[in-house]
Amino acid sequence: MPEPTPSNYVPLGRVRRQDGAPRDQVTLEAFLPGRWSGSLVLTYSPVDPVRVGSGVLFPQPVRGQTELVQDVTLVRGKPVLPGSSVKGAVRSLVEAIGGGCDLQGTCQPLCVACSLFGTVQGNDSWKGRVGFDDALAAKDVKLGLARLPRAFPPKATVGRRAYGPAPEGVRGEDPYFVVMPGSTLTGRLLVHNLDDAELGLVLTACGLDGSFAPRLGGGKYQGLGRTRIAVTSARLRQGPGRPRALRGAELDERISLWLGAWQPPEGADKVLGVLRQQMGVR
């Protein structure tokens, strides 16, 4: 059996588990006073090439010969970041910094991550209060080619991890189309009955404090995926009132308040330090 590919991950430390909002206090069928519901428009700007493979192979001329290259995921002929992929990446970060469960057995009472993103445990399930639309490419999207080594699992389980720059001396073999830096994709973050601290936690996991760029898509073991996420506008209601649009300085002020409302639990500062070291941007 081949040796595991040299990787670039750093194990994340443990964060003290935090309970989420109890089910009987956060209905999904009404708008609760003081809680935020609606949508925030997000832009995704790759810092590194981003790969979200479709599994479809195309013969392409590469360096004077024909190779089978895996295409990116397309919607109406344009590259897309599937909302499910973004949600999975952001949920992992919320689990890591917010004090999620250990993903083993049942989660009762619900941890903060399961309360926000949902969970299925046997015959019991809980619909999440956070979701992401597919992020569609704008007209300035740029595609490139990346070669990745064939990945093999690590010899030992390392728990949650953060991926950094590509390891040295690893030869790329298989070609993939990737979305290149300089591209822009646009999608939405959908929320229902989140309080200020919960929304601040989700936005922190999206890198809205500016200290790191989450890695999205595949090829993280080869340094791919860092993506800046920004909120350009929002349409939200606080409680049962009418939704209203937020833009410009008013939106920036509100984002700052949300980020400040989230208080990192015990151990989160060390985890955030690792994320900023491995996924920091200049």
Image: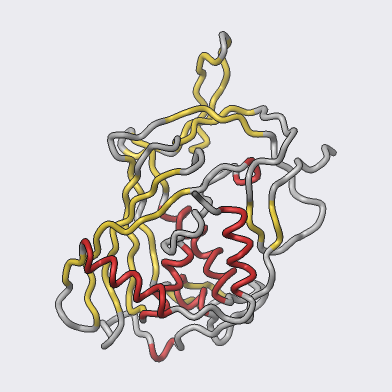
Where on the picture, by quarter, is residue 265? bottom right
Expressed as whole percent of the image width and height from the top left, the position of residue 153 reads 74, 48
The residue lying furthest to the top in this view is: 64
Expressed as whole percent of the image width and height from the top left, the position of residue 75 reads 34, 39
Residue at x 63%, y 52% (from the top left corner):
163
Which of these two is toward me, 41 or 240?
41
Q: Is residue 9 above or below residue 94?
A: above
Q: How is the image coloured?
A: secondary structure
Q: Is residue 147 above or below residue 126?
A: above
State whether residue 279 appears in this view. yes
State whether residue 51 appears in this view. no
The residue lying furthest to the bottom in this view is: 24
Give the tally of numbered discs: 0
- Looking at the rendered image, the quarter that the N terminus falls into is top right
Residue at x 40%, y 54% (from the top left corner):
229
Q: Is residue 227 above or below residue 202?
A: above
The residue lying furthest to the front in this view is: 282
Position of residue 140 in the picture relative to residue 68 (left or right): left
Where on the picture, by quarter, is residue 67? top right
Where on the picture, by quarter, is residue 159? bottom right
Residue at x 67%, y 29% (from the top left corner):
172
Expressed as whole percent of the image width and height from the top left, the position of residue 124 reads 52, 79
